[in-house]
Image: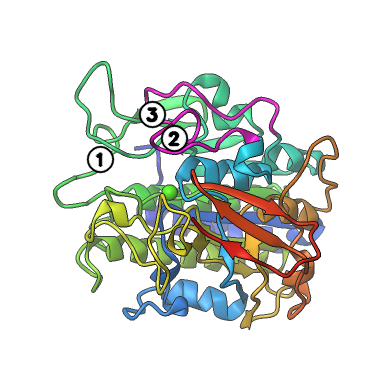
Amino acid sequence: MRVMSTLTLILFCAIICCTVTEKTSNVLSPNIIIMLMDDMGWGDLGVFGQPSKETPNLDAMAAQGMLLPNFYTANPLCSPSRAALLTGRLPVRNGFYTTNAHARNAYTPQEIVGGISKDEILIPQMLKKKGYVSKIVGKWHLGHRPQYLPLEKGFDEWFGAPDCHFGPYNSSIRPNIPVYNNSEMLGRYYEEFKIDRKSGESNLTQMYLLEGLDFILRQTEDQRPFFLYWAADATHAPVYASKRFLGKSQRGRYGDAVMELDYSVGQILSLLRNLAIENNTFVFFTSDNGAALVSGPNESGSNGPFLCGKQTTFEGGMREPAIAWWPGHIEGGTVNFQLANVMDLFTTSLAVAGITPPDDRTLDGLDLTPVLLNCPHTLKNRRVHYTHLHTLLCNFSSQSSITVGMS
Ligand SMILES: [Ca+2]
């Protein structure tokens, strides 16, 4: 296995942390980390009221940063949500807008041939203007054919898979989903990358954690600003966790997966502090869509008080847990009820990096930095309307009060 062991990485950290701290003041552009969970619900975090209170690291992240209770996805399904986040554009603009039932672009298992358009501009492509190095760790889901893969869309590194970890499949016509390191296919889920469907045991989250930590370390040592898109998928059915976490949660296997992701978030934030780059790293935590009640009680999370979940445009499908963290810039322990959206992460990331957004297209995301950096400031004049077919339509120019409609 190419992924280094936890002990090796800790030793590695201890050695280089001492050497990089003095250098990091030369890095002016803030690093950006977006942690995107898969099918994690608004109600899965202790800070949002989860009674089990098994997310101490995320709760601490919120205490040190800003909680955004009114944060939404652009579509209650993996692919269009991720496309909207990375392009800053509505699903109906970026081409990822249909549903599982229609499945033209919105969902990309092996049989689907579509993918992200070459004309769409993604966050890492823009960040290159200022010398950022970008890595995606985990699930891509914007097309599995070579021309659609992450390294074709601005990412410099990738460790993860193009699709969901569904399976196992045993057909030569429908093989298991591959796992890549950059452009090299390392193996497949259920084969070289084990997921035990019976026990739920898998080391994938640990691998994704170590890949993220290793990337942060290397870029810090090289004094290069970085963008880490950490897209772990343990809370997507079939949910999984490593042996250390299995059986530990009061909430069953799904809770075990949440606990391991929470632990991983804590490890990443701790590394930023140990490297003394926490004041120069903007971190945002959220999920791609609401908890997947369609996956059944043992493999789905909680949407708190909100109705329904994934694959619906009710609140439970659209509203996401969201925490912004940037010590020294975002005031700790703040809560802002700004109506916000995953598309804002495109515009906000560019603002954090000091990059002008592209002017040759309509962008639907807003720059949230006035909200994040000047709480309790809020942006006005935003309307959000959800319509049928899992499509989010927005009008940001209206002078009307905020309205939220569901169908
Ligand atoms: Ca998802």
Residue under the image location 31 percent in, 78 percent down: 52
Instruction: Kindly report which numbered mark, 2 or 1, lies closer to the viewer in this rendering.
Output: 2
Element marked by disc 3: strand
Q: Is residue 107 magenta?
A: yes
Q: Earlier in the sequence, mark 3 or mark 1?
A: 3
Q: How many residues crowd mark 2 within 10 Å: few (<14), some (14–19), many (20+)?
A: many
Q: Earlier in the sequence, mark 3 or mark 2?
A: 2
* Left or right of 184 in this view: 272: right
Q: Looking at the image, is 179 positioned above or below residue 4?
A: above
Q: How many residues crowd mark 1 within 10 Å: few (<14), some (14–19), many (20+)?
A: some
Does mark 2's beta carbon lie closer than 8 Å to ligand 1?
no
Residue wearing tag 1: 194
User: What colour scheme has been applied to the protein in the rendered image?
Assistant: rainbow
Residues in magenta, as a range: 94-120
Residue wearing tag 3: 186
User: Residue 339 falls in which quadrant of the image?
Assistant: bottom right
Residue wearing tag 2: 107
Amino acid on which the number 2 mark rests in the picture = Tyr
Element marked by disc 1: loop
Instruction: Kindly report which numbered mark, 3 or 2, lies closer to the viewer in this rendering.
Output: 2
Residue at the top extreme, as displayed: 173
Residue under the image location 75 percent in, 40 percent down: 126
* Left or right of 15 in this view: 202: left
Element marked by disc 2: loop
